[in-house]
């Protein structure tokens, strides 16, 4: 018996250590790395600002377009936009901003319907920022990663190795384009730009944007529907209650199409190669977790490529991807910018990291094959630019409409995608039926419980029978205290006689682990969960519970440090876990019993930093498990040990009589 108890203690210690290691791997270490990264970025920002203020002029850098370094620095993004007066406004259904006529750049883009914070008056989330925008560390509390110059450019390069004696004057970052009209870019009105290089070449650029193809009842108006202008920019939770219940997913509205053409009015043929690029200046902050990929991303001829910003360090060598199809760009937690040529177009893709004026810059570039344009002829090339939120329905729509190579893979579903994607779809369906993502999560839990009920029911019944025959098991241990072989044989005979499976109690727990992590993934990576409210103080299910036990959930006017942020729902989760464990008899070994008593407290602290939606799911799942287990134990005539265990734990022990 002593050996068995020792084995149980060792098993409990191993499981506890495993839990601690998992927490440290997925939460502790990423949090520490993120803090170190933020400190490094802060130092980097100060050095970069000093270097850029001292640098008098632009110096072209191989890979990164010339003219990026040495740009005048402004105090804010808004000042950087206002500092470039030659612009054409963007006023589309889901995007706002402007196009910079200097360089013909798409460098000022923000999202309608997505605000930086829960405050409806907070700024719209920006996706692109012009040159001169100050590089700032990311704000992880609001998941805002784009804190420096970040823009998309398009153009032409001379044929590599050209022996032409006359160097072609091709458009660059300092080229001033002429707009045929000052009408804002919208779904109905494209922007047309033109530039004459003075050598017989006339360059044309037409920029258009797709419309929002929302389903009926969408946040944004679809065909035949209207939405008041004052509601167009509001997040879903800030809409009137009657509109929230009918909100359907918006689809599209994030895709630019850029058509570049060249007219050769000269007397000699020219050879030039079209290119497109996205340039990001400054290292953006990332979540620092293995659960989510953030950074350079591409899909080349059916193969996914994911890089980190460290992979693009100036001294790191990244080989180009030659003669491929697909797309490439940069992805953040909720947003992405990606270049998407025609599905059949072959190109050379490259990711480049450079140092520009003391600041790291990252380039995702597409180079297409050289084209020859005879005198009197013209050539045209078209490139799509996705700039928007990583909405599941929108990305799937683009895959179908544009026949892209799985642009939906911008969302990191992870290795458990076969569970994560159906789970998200189930939650989404329930949300549109109920009108609240929190209730949809609770409904999903009920459905999962019903799905696993036969297996869980059989498991709980087997566990209940084991408890019923514990006196006989103890009798076997007492009969063969020093002969483990006979002890095991007698135990197996008892199990076989009464149809007891000693391992069946572990199976439901093992099956719930991938579901638990899949739900965590859904809450962590899908933008549909961002700022989705529940009830009371939970205004964002994708963020941790903002309350904490250490100031009595707001009753004491004090804000504890982040390590003490143990919210109300996390405490409830710990209580339900504690109650569930107390349904069973206390382990006979004092060490093992003490470890099981501490287990709920360990999990409470571990899950404090998890999204509130996941913790609420865990509370509800524990509650359903308690009811289910208590019902089955009662049905099988097994005593429920809850009250006895509580009395034994908290009751006053009788004092021994004086001798």
Image (cartoon, rainbow, N blue to C red):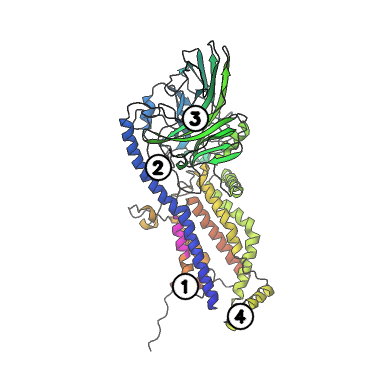
Residue 146 on image: x %, y %: 43, 37
Determine the CA span between mark 4 and mark 2.
Answer: 62 Å
In terms of image quadrants, where is residue 484?
A: bottom right
- Can I make out residue 220 in this image? no
Give percent across and percent down for residue 212.
Answer: 55, 31
- The answer to whether the residues at label 4 and label 2 have Cβ atoms under 8 Å apart is no
Q: Are marks 3 and 1 in contact (CB under 8 Å)?
A: no
Question: Which residue lies under the disc numbered 4?
Answer: 476
Secondary structure beneath disc 3?
Answer: strand
Distance between the alpha carbons at the discs numbered 3 and 1: 62 Å
Q: Note whether residue 618 is visible.
A: yes
Residue 468 position (above or below residue 628): below
Marked residue nearer the N-terminal end (4 or 2): 2
Compared across the picture, whether 304 is left or right of 609 comes to: right
Q: Residues within 10 Å of mark 2 (few under 14, many from 20)?
A: some
**Which of the two labelled residues, at mark 3 and mark 1, occupies the earlier sequence position?**
3
**Which segment is the magenta one?**
599-608
Q: Residues at badges 4 and 1 in contact (C-beta under 8 Å)?
A: no
Asked if labels 3 and 4 touch by Cβ distance under 8 angstroms, the answer is no
| Depicted 125 relative to depicted 524: above or below | above
Between marks 3 and 2 in the image, the one whose residue lies nearer the viewer: 3
The residue labelled by disc 1 is 591
Q: Earlier in the sequence, mark 4 or mark 1?
A: 4
Residue sitting farthest toward the top: 267
- Pointer 3 residue: 277
Q: Which residue is mark 2?
A: 139
Which element is circle 4 on?
Answer: helix
Question: 10 Å neighbourhood of mark 1: few (<14), some, or many (≥20)?
Answer: some
| Count of marks placed on residues | 4
Question: Which residue is depicted at the point 53% across and 65% down?
Answer: 580
* Frontmost residue, 87 versus 299: 299
Q: Earlier in the sequence, mark 3 or mark 2?
A: 2
């Amino acid at each position: 018996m002593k050996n068995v108890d020792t084995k149980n203690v060792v098993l409990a210690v191993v499981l506890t250590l495993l839990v601690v290691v998992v927490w440290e791997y997925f939460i502790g270490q990423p949090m520490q790395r993120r803090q170190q990264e933020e400190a490094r970025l802060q130092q980097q920002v100060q050095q970069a600002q000093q270097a850029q203020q001292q640098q008098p002029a632009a110096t072209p850098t191989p890979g990164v377009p010339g003219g990026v370094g040495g740009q005048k620095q402004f105090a804010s993004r808004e000042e950087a936009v206002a500092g470039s007066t030659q612009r054409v406004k963007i006023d589309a259904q889901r995007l706002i901003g402007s196009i910079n006529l200097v360089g013909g750049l798409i460098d000022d883009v923000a999202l309608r319907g997505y605000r930086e914070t829960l405050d409806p008056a907070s700024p719209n989330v920006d996706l692109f920022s012009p040159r001169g925008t100050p590089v700032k560390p990311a704000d992880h509390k609001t998941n805002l990663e784009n804190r420096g110059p970040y823009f998309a450019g398009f153009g032409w390069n001379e044929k590599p190795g050209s022996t032409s004696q006359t160097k072609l004057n091709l458009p660059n970052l300092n080229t001033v384009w002429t707009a045929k009209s000052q009408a804002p870019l919208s779904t109905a009105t494209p922007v047309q730009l033109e530039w004459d290089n003075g050598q017989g070449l006339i360059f044309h650029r037409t920029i258009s944007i797709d419309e929002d193809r929302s389903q009926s009842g969408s946040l944004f108006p679809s065909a035949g529907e209207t939405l008041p202008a004052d509601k167009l920019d509001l997040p879903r939770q800030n809409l009137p209650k009657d509109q929230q219940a009918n909100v359907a997913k918006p689809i599209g509205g994030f895709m630019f199409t850029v058509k570049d053409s060249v007219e050769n009015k000269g007397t000699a043929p020219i050879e030039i190669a079209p290119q497109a690029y996205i340039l990001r200046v400054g290292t953006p902050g990332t979540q620092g977790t293995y659960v989510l990929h953030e950074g350079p991303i591409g899909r080349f001829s059916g193969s996914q490529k994911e890089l980190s910003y460290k992979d693009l360090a100036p001294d790191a060598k990244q080989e180009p991807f030659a003669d491929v199809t697909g797309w490439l760009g940069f992805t953040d937690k909720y947003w992405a910018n990606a270049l998407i040529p025609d599905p059949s177009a072959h190109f050379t893709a490259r990711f480049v990291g450079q140092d520009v004026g003391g600041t790291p810059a990252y380039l995702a570039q597409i180079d297409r094959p050289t084209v020859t344009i005879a005198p009197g002829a013209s050539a045209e090339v078209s490139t799509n630019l996705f700039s928007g939120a990583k909405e599941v329905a929108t990305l799937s729509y683009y895959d179908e409409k544009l026949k892209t190579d799985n642009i939906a893979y911008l969302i990191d579903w992870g290795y458990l995608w076969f569970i994560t994607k159906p789970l998200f779809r189930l939650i989404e369906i329930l949300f549109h039926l109920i009108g609240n993502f929190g209730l949809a999560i609770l409904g999903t839990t009920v459905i999962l419980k019903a799905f696993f009920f036969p297996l869980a029911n059989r498991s709980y019944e087997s566990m209940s029978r084991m408890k019923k025959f514990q006196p006989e098991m103890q009798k076997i241990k007492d009969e063969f205290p020093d002969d483990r072989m006979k002890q095991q044989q007698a135990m197996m005979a008892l199990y076989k006689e009464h149809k007891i499976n000693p391992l069946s109690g572990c199976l439901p727990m093992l099956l719930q682990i991938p579901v638990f992590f899949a739900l965590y993934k859904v809450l962590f990576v899908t933008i549909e969960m961002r700022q989705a409210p529940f009830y009371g103080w939970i205004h964002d299910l994708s963020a941790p519970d903002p309350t904490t036990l250490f100031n009595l959930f707001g009753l004491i006017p004090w804000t504890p440090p982040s390590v003490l942020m143990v919210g109300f729902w996390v405490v409830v989760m710990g209580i339900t876990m504690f109650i569930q464990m107390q349904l069973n008899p206390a382990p006979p070994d004092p060490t093992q019993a003490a470890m099981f008593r501490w287990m709920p407290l360990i999990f409470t602290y571990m899950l404090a930093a998890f999204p509130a939606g996941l913790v609420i799911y865990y509370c509800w799942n524990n509650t359903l498990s308690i009811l289910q287990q208590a019902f089955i134990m009662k049905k099988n005539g097994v005593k429920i040990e809850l009250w006895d265990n509580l009395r034994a734990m908290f009751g006053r022990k009788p004092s021994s009589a004086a001798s």
